[in-house]
Amino acid sequence: MRYEQHYAWSILLRLFHWSFALSIVALVVTGFYIHHPWTNTLLEGDSSFPVGTMRYIHFVAGFVFTGSLLARLYLLIFGNKQERVWDFLPVTPRNIRNLLCTLGFYLYCPVKHEIKLGHNVLAGTFYLITFVMALLQLVSGFYMLYPESMAWQKWGLMLGPQQQARYIHFLIMWYFILFAFIHVYIVVWNDIKSKEGLISSIFNGTKYTHSS
Ligand code: HEM
Ligand code: HEM
């Protein structure tokens, strides 16, 4: 078997991936705490400030999340071929075929697995949905953080009053939790089934194609 190495992901994309993933871990943990503080909050304001500290970490992670998302939105248009949105949108006959083949591959059907340097189109479609969810999370988060700001109100009011935005913010957290578990399962499964160096590619940027 001959392997060829290809450069797939720029440094900015890999930085985006890890700052996005790690900020989400911090946001989920602190978000759960803000939703339902699990320590004795009678301590609050005495010797420690657990709710205040958790909120502070949440907002710092929120800014990291925002920065990484902006970088990814830039790459959707100005990134390399694999990073641009057209590469993984299911709108061309080729991409629709790739989406169906990937579904078949995941369902253990005897279809020929198409090797693609960028994301397969099924994954790409879910990444796009994730970016939209991230934008909603960002708008609802900043709307709660700066309730008096006219700019954030303009966007935030589309989600309804503050309480409703907070509830939407809480529900979207579950999307991210589900996504993270399924995503990690699928990348490990893919890494074992198809020898492309998928997981290492999100660290070093390179993937492999092979011919026997
Ligand atoms: C994936 C990303 C995020 C997750 C999973 C998340 C999760 C949560 C959760 C679960 C809550 C508690 C809601 C409740 O009480 O029901 C919360 C509150 C909040 N989040 Fe986020 N969040 C995220 C991103 C952000 C961002 C980007 C910001 C903007 C800076 C932000 C700002 C806030 C604010 C201001 C609150 C309300 C805090 C309070 O009232 O004490 N969040 N978040
Ligand atoms: C151990 C943890 C993780 C590993 C090993 C990992 C690995 C990977 C790999 C290999 C890819 C490229 C897959 C492909 O080509 O389709 C990828 C993409 C991606 N991952 Fe992860 N991931 C991890 C955690 C997470 C978490 C927690 C999130 C967010 C909740 C996340 C969000 C994404 C996104 C949005 C992409 C698309 C990248 C892009 O084009 O913008 N990942 N990940």
Image: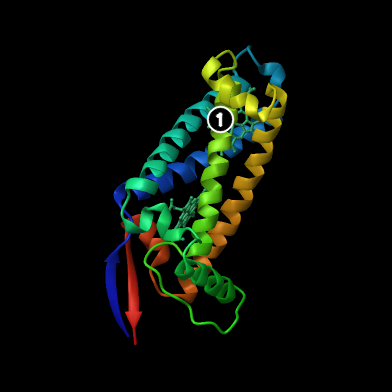
Relative to 55, 40 lies left or right: right
Amino acid under disc 1: Val
Q: Residue at x 60, y 14 (%)?
A: 47
How is colour applied across the structure in the image?
Answer: rainbow
Question: In the image, residue 38 lies at what x, y percent?
Answer: 70, 31
Q: Residue at x 64, y 34 (%)?
A: 169
Which quadrant would the C terminus be assigned to in this image? bottom left
Helix, strand or loop at label 1? It is: helix
Which quadrant would the N terminus be assigned to in this image? bottom left
Q: Residue at x 55, y 55 (%)?
A: 126
Q: Could you say which is closer to the camera, residue 38 or residue 200?
A: 200
- With respect to residue 71, does 161 lie above or below? above
- With respect to residue 69, does 58 lie above or below? above
- With respect to residue 61, does 80 lie above or below? below
**Residue 53 in sight from this viewpoint:** no
Q: Quadrant of residue 105?
A: bottom right
Q: Residue at x 36, y 61 (%)?
A: 201
Question: In the image, residue 135 lies at what x, y percent?
Answer: 53, 37
Relative to 57, 38 lies left or right: right
The answer to whether the beta carbon of the residue marked 1 is less than 8 Å from any atom of ligand 1 is: no
Residue furthest out toward the bottom: 212
For ligand 1, the image quadrant comes to: top right
Q: Pointer 1: what residue? A: 139
**Residue 43 in sight from this viewpoint:** yes
Question: In the image, residue 91 lies at what x, y percent?
Answer: 49, 61
Q: Quadrant of residue 205?
A: bottom left
Question: In the image, residue 36 lies at what x, y percent?
Answer: 71, 30
Callout 1: few (<14), some (14-19), or many (20+) C-alpha neighbours within 10 Å?
many
